[in-house]
Image (cartoon, rainbow, N blue to C red):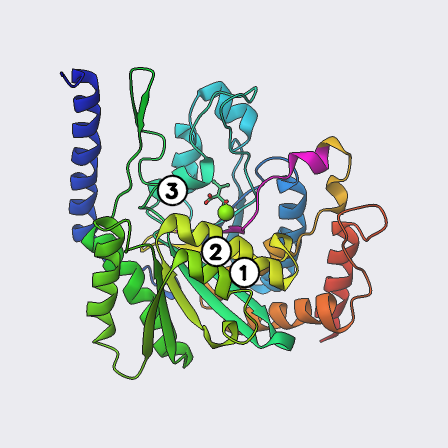
Amino acid sequence: MQIPREAVEKYEKVILSQLERIEKMKAQGDFTDYKKLDTLIIGVCGGDGIGPMITAEARKILELLLADEIGSGRVEIRTIDGLTIENRAKCNKAIPDDVLGELKKCHVILKGPTTTPRAGDPWPNIESANVAMRKALDLFANVRPVKVPKQNIDWTFFRENTEGGYAVGSQGVSVGDDLAVDFTITTTQGSERIIRLAFEYAKKTGKTHVTAVTKANVIKTTDGKFLNIFKQIAKEYPDIRTDDWYIDIMTAKLVDEKRRTQFQVLVLPNLYGDILTDEAAEFQGGVGTAGSANIGKRYAMFEAIHGSAPRMVEENRAQYADPCSMLRACVMLLEHIGEAEKAKKLASALDYCMFEKPERVITGRPDGATAAQFTEYLTEVINAR
Ligand code: IPM
Ligand code: MG
């Protein structure tokens, strides 16, 4: 039997592109020191569906908290247009070249959810803008905190963001009608940098426990590599307790009230991180309440963990969408640029408005507050402090 040349060539291309990526990772410098910049540029793109609306609310709060820095020219908040599904479809690109050029002129990005096309949609089946941006800007660490203080839940997920099933998720190979092959990628450099970041975070924040989540018993080569590297790096942190779990039992253990409170920092390959963080966010009040940081050495992007909710727009409910995911993303953005005090201020005002005195409750429907009403309340609370 002959392997079609086309399939072999596609496979070679995948391997080659990953080998090139490894060289780039090896050549990478250290993290950007934002304090050394004359002007720090925050790019804001609204995205699709409920995105523009909840992003606009989050932007108002950023502008409020950074008013002095914006006034003095230390910080610039810049609108980046063109990351809409209509424009991406028109250009037939996950991120149109000119938009990527504009994004690269920023230091950090606040991004609303973007619609991810799939087969059968009215849009061309282009790659997700999220996934493309994470790869194009090498945002290798997807940091997703989930906290439910009353239940003693305080988890921080470090999801690898550029490899696994996502690395070449849109470059699978179809061989004839009957065979479809996708690829999952794990590199030494890619695993080391995310695992090390998780341990460093634990060390810096006084956490005592780091957990790896894989399916290394079945996906032996790639997950096996990730787990091996985890075990190696763990030796450098003798004061931190480590363990490893498989993704299936871990999804079960997150609903085990006795067991789940022991987890603190979790580090995991891309797809498991995608799935587990949606489950985790549900305990906190749903994906609408969870923000996410996508961190790289040169750039960082902050977003909601959920999608663009086109159904809410179709049902004319977009104004009732929960902006808390984007506001939590702003907390992480502020922390990341070295504004720890402002980050704390926003986080505690959010806790107050969401849990302590929820005067304007978002339900996603007309029986609840609109995103704008919630942000007004949040503004009052911030100003009163
Ligand atoms: C997320 C989202 C994205 C992902 C989608 C929208 C491509 O689910 O940020 O978790 O799968 O990473
Ligand atoms: Mg997800």
Which one is in front in this view, the residue at disc 1 or the one at disc 3?
A: 1
Q: CA gap, disc 2 to disc 1?
A: 6 Å
Residue situated in front as seen by the camera: 362 or 264: 264
Question: Tag 3's secondary structure?
Answer: helix
Tell me if mark 2 has few (under 14), some (14-19) or many (20+) residues whose alpha carbon lies within 10 angstroms of its own.
Answer: some
Locate the C terminus by quadrant: bottom right
Residue 309, magenta (yes or no): yes
Element at label 1: helix
The answer to whether residue 82 is left or right of residue 8 is right
Residue drawn 57% across the image and 59% down it: 281
- Residue 257, image quadrant: bottom right
Q: Amino acid at mark 2?
A: Leu
Res 280 label: 1
Looking at the rendered structure, the kind of residue marked 1 is: Ala
Amino acid marked by disc 3:
Lys
Q: Position of residue 318 (x, y in %)?
A: 73, 40
Residue 169 versus residue 150 in the image, above or below? above
Which segment did they paint magenta? Answer: 300-313
Q: Position of residue 236 (x, y in %)?
A: 21, 76
Q: Is residue 39 visible?
A: no
Relative height, residue 59 to residue 256 (above, below): above
Q: Are marks 1 and 3 in contact (CB under 8 Å)?
A: no
Give me the C-alpha separation between circle 2 and circle 3. Answer: 30 Å
Q: Is residue 337 magenta?
A: no
Q: Which residue is mark 2?
A: 276
Quadrant where the image shows the N terminus: top left
Label 1: few (<14), some or many (≥20) within 10 Å? Answer: many
Where 200 sits versus 334, above or below?
Answer: below
Mark earlier in primary sequence (2, 3): 3
Q: Nearer the viewer, mark 2 or mark 3?
A: 2
Residue indicated by mark 3: 104
Image check: 110 left or right of 320?
A: left
